[in-house]
Image: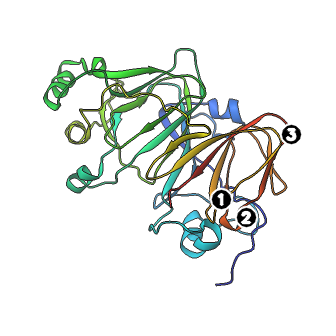
Amino acid sequence: MPALKLAQPLVFQPIFMERVWGGRRLEALYGKHLPSGVRIGESWEIVDRPEAQSVVETGPLRGSTLHDLWANHRAEIFGDVPDHPRFPLLVKLLDAQDKLSLQVHPPPDAVRALGGESKSEFWYIADASPAAELFAGLAGASSRSAFESAIADGTVEQQVHRIKAAAGDAMFLPSGRLHAIGAGNVIVEIQQNSDTTYRVFDWNRRSSSGTQRELHVQESLRCIDFDDLRPELARPDGESLVREEFFNVDKWHLDGERKATLANSFAIFCCLIGPVECCGRAFQAGQFFLLPASLSGTTIRASGRSELLRITITT
């Protein structure tokens, strides 16, 4: 297969997901063209899963899926990366106008017993209401049996650690951490390519027909790390927000131009405050682009104060 000669970053069509806790903030904040009349909770910006595929929006690769590119053009686009059957990250925007369910993603040891896929993830708070909060880990010492009793008697909310959230905050959530996003948050979520979630509590919500969402109490109890007490928000180390086994996230404050040094690997950029320009294409707040490995060293420019998240994988 002939080598690709790419002149611009890759931009993918977002995939919008209706959620009971969603809203319309992605339209108001970022001009996303949401389907009318529904509550959109998630915009899957970059994804390679059997049930959901990112598709290139413009350029010579228009119409190609992310999986096609990963399978057939890995060296030119993604560079020197670990071998996975699918692109290893899933990148989303979340609009939580109501609380998400209290949930957990299985750690690797639980996957061996329960099936599914392990998942660690990272939250960057792009926008937050004055009352916004996050739920993560346990508020105090507990055990599986004590937590199960709290579920049964309706006091489980008291067991969860609550954290005040504000725009610019960030948090890493390893698999096994009990968590939920509180109402009023708009979040950039970067995660392992997994969609296995066990809901342990859904705040007693009911649908319009009076039914409750399915819970996975026993699976959740198998997965929750009961030693995970009062976790804290991420503490940036210079530009670095997180350095973990699966991905790295940096926050750039850009006023002028800067080379996106990639060292023979791709990078995903999320524009937080724009505009920025890369290879002749402008990007506004809420837009994402994948800079191929073959364009390493490309300059990204801002005409004023801009902010970007730079997402890479550990090689």
Residue 295 position within the rendered picture, expressed as x and y whole percent measured from the top left: 73, 64
Q: Name the kind of residue labelled 3 in the image.
A: Ser
Q: Name the kind of residue labelled 2 in the image.
A: Leu
Q: Quadrant of residue 201?
A: top left
Quadrant where the image shows the N terminus: bottom right
- Circle 1 packing at 10 Å, graded few (<14), some (14-19), many (20+), is some
Write the residue at 79% across / 54% down: 299
Mark 2–mark 3 distance (CA, rounded to whole Å): 21 Å
Seen in the image, is 62 located left or right of residue 51? right
Q: Quadrant of residue 146?
A: top left
Mark 1–mark 2 distance (CA, rounded to whole Å): 8 Å
Which residue carries the number 1 mark? 262
Q: Are marks 2 and 3 in contact (CB under 8 Å)?
A: no
Q: Is residue 94 above or below residue 185?
A: below
Which residue carries the number 3 mark? 303
Compare residues 95 and 291 and report the one nearer the observer. 291
Write the residue at 51% across / 42% down: 242
Compare residues 239 and 5 and report the one nearer the observer. 239
Which residue carries the number 2 mark? 295
Q: SS for tag 3? A: loop
